[in-house]
Structure formats: structure tokens, C-alpha cells
């Protein structure tokens, strides 16, 4: 009897997870995936600009300030980019299924990125490019930590 109850509870849990997973309409899931992709592309493009600025002997402060603000704004939006039902099972994405399998770890990495992006933005806004560069490097470390576990290459 006890085994049957455990088995029944497992079936109910799987069924409930499937309903929660499928609760997002396909058009909504695809729209979120598109928003996530565009946001990550913008972060990547902005990162390329910032990398060039920080590689120079005198970074152009307005470009660094603008880039830092862009990334900090997108970092805040990223909290809404990974709801259940927007993973590889829905379509082409660079987001690995591990995101939804390891939510606690992923959320920790996302928060670390958001905090690092905010700190980079504050340093850039201060005009101190040495401090901004140090905060930028710290932010990139958070990107790398997350991408190592949760990003796959997308070919479009």
C-alpha cells in the first residue's frame, strides 16, 4: 500500500509539473524566447564595444557610461527571460535545459550578474574609468560563470 501511495504521489507530481511546464501558451513562450535572445545579443554587442574601450589607453567615458547603463538595464530585465516552458523543448535557444533543472544555482548566478552590472554601472557613472574597468572585469566573470553551465552555442 505504501509503495502505491508513493508511486501515485510521483505520478501526480510529474503531471503537475507537466501542467505547470505547459501552462505558458506557445506564442507567449516564443515571444519571451525572442526577447531573451535579443536582450542577450544586445548585451554581447555592448560588451564588444566596452572591451574595445577598455583595451585602449584612454577609454571614452561617454561610451563606457552608455554601455554600462545598457547592460545594467538589460540585466534587470533578465529576471523575466527564463520562465518554465521557454527552454530547448520549445525551440531554438542558447539556453540549456539545465537552467530549469538547477533553478537555485541559475538564479544565484543571475543575481550575481545583476549585482555586478549595477556596480559596474555605478562605477562608470562616477567617471572613474579605472574603477569602471575593475567592475567591468568582475561583471564579465559573472557572465562567464553562468555561460559555462547554462549556455549552448546558437547557430542562426
Image (cartoon, grey):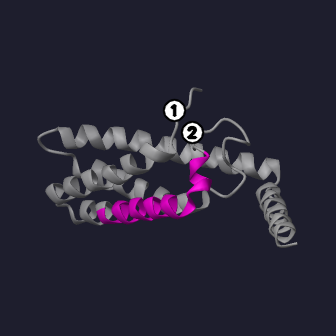
Query: Disc 2 on helix, strand or loop?
Result: loop
Q: Position of residue 100 (x, y in %)?
A: 62, 55
Report the magenta residues as a range.
Answer: 97-119
Inspect this view and state whether residue 62 appears. Answer: no
Q: Residue at x 17, y 55 (%)?
A: 129
Q: Residue at x 69, y 49 (%)?
A: 86
Tell me the CA gap for discs 1 and 2. 6 Å
Q: Quadrant of the N terminus?
A: bottom right
Q: Position of residue 135 (x, y in %)?
A: 25, 58
User: Is 42 in the magenta?
Assistant: no
Q: Which residue is mark 1?
A: 153
Q: Where 21 falls versus 13 (above or below)?
A: above
**Relative depth, front residue between 27 and 95:** 95
The prevailing secondary structure element of the residues shown in magenta is helix
Label 1 with label 2: CB-CB less than 8 Å: yes
**Relative depth, front residue between 78 and 128:** 78
Q: Which residue is mark 2?
A: 94
Amino acid at each position: 500500500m505504501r509503495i502505491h501511495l508513493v508511486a501515485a504521489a510521483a505520478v501526480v507530481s510529474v503531471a503537475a509539473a507537466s501542467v505547470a511546464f505547459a501552462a505558458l501558451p506557445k506564442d507567449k513562450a516564443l515571444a519571451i524566447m525572442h526577447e531573451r535572445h535579443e536582450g542577450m545579443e544586445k548585451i554581447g554587442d555592448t560588451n564588444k564595444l566596452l572591451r574595445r574601450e577598455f583595451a585602449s589607453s584612454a577609454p571614452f567615458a561617454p561610451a563606457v557610461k552608455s554601455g554600462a547603463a545598457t547592460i545594467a538595464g538589460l540585466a534587470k530585465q533578465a529576471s523575466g527571460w527564463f520562465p518554465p516552458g521557454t527552454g530547448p523543448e520549445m525551440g531554438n535557444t542558447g539556453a540549456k535545459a539545465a537552467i530549469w533543472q538547477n533553478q537555485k544555482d541559475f538564479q544565484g548566478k543571475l543575481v550575481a550578474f545583476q549585482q555586478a552590472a549595477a556596480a559596474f554601472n555605478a562605477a562608470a557613472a562616477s567617471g572613474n574609468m579605472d574603477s569602471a574597468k575593475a567592475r567591468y572585469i568582475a561583471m564579465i566573470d559573472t557572465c562567464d560563470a553562468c555561460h559555462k553551465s547554462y549556455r549552448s552555442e546558437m547557430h542562426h
